[in-house]
Image (cartoon, rainbow, N blue to C red):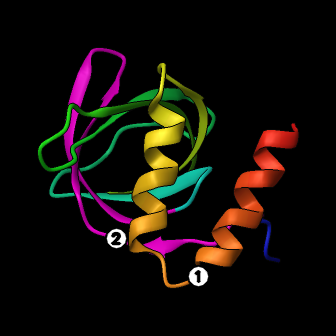
Amino acid sequence: MQQRRFHRITFSAPGELSHHGLTYQVRLQNISLRGALLASDECLLVPVGDSCTLALSLPGEPPVLITAQAVHTFFSMLGIKFVGFTAGAEQRLYALLKNITSQADLLEEEWHVILRH
């Protein structure tokens, strides 16, 4: 059953995932306004339901810091949903996705849903 409310955009970018004092080097596989799929060269030891922090690296900019919760885990893959953003991070994420999506109208509709809540 499809539970996603926001479409995923294929996008590869490096990042760091922090969980209970451990930091993992990860790479985005896809991303939406409210979640992402991450991959790593090592096993990601983040149990479903646990909170973690994603520092998403963007060229020429400081990292986007996002608090997330693990929703799916499989060895070196981790599905996360975004639950909190540092100041300005949510708007930066929207601007990034707007530049890389082929479905700008759908992204804008999803953004307005977020703003209403």
Q: Which residue is mark 1?
A: 103
Whether 12 is among the magenta residues is: yes
Residues at discs 2 and 1 in contact (Cβ within 8 Å): no
The x and y percentages for residue 19 are 36, 24
Nearest the eye: 58 or 82? 58
Q: Amino acid at mark 1?
A: Gln
The residue furthest bottom is 102
Q: Which residue is mark 2?
A: 11
The alpha-carbon separation of the residues under discs 2 and 1 comes to: 14 Å
The x and y percentages for residue 14 are 19, 52
The residue shown at (25%, 34%) is: 63
Disc 2 or 1, which lies upstream in sequence?
2
Nearest the eye: 61 or 84? 61
The x and y percentages for residue 87 are 48, 19
Lateral position of residue 99 relative to residue 98, left or right:
left
Lateral position of residue 69 relative to residue 58, left or right:
right
The residue furthest top is 21
Lateral position of residue 69 relative to residue 13, left or right:
right
Q: Is residue 66 above or below residue 107?
A: above
Nearest the eye: 35 or 112? 112
Q: Amino acid at mark 2?
A: Phe
2 or 1: mark nearer the eye = 1
Lateral position of residue 112 relative to residue 92, left or right:
right
- The magenta stretch spans which residues? 4-31
The residue furthest right is 116
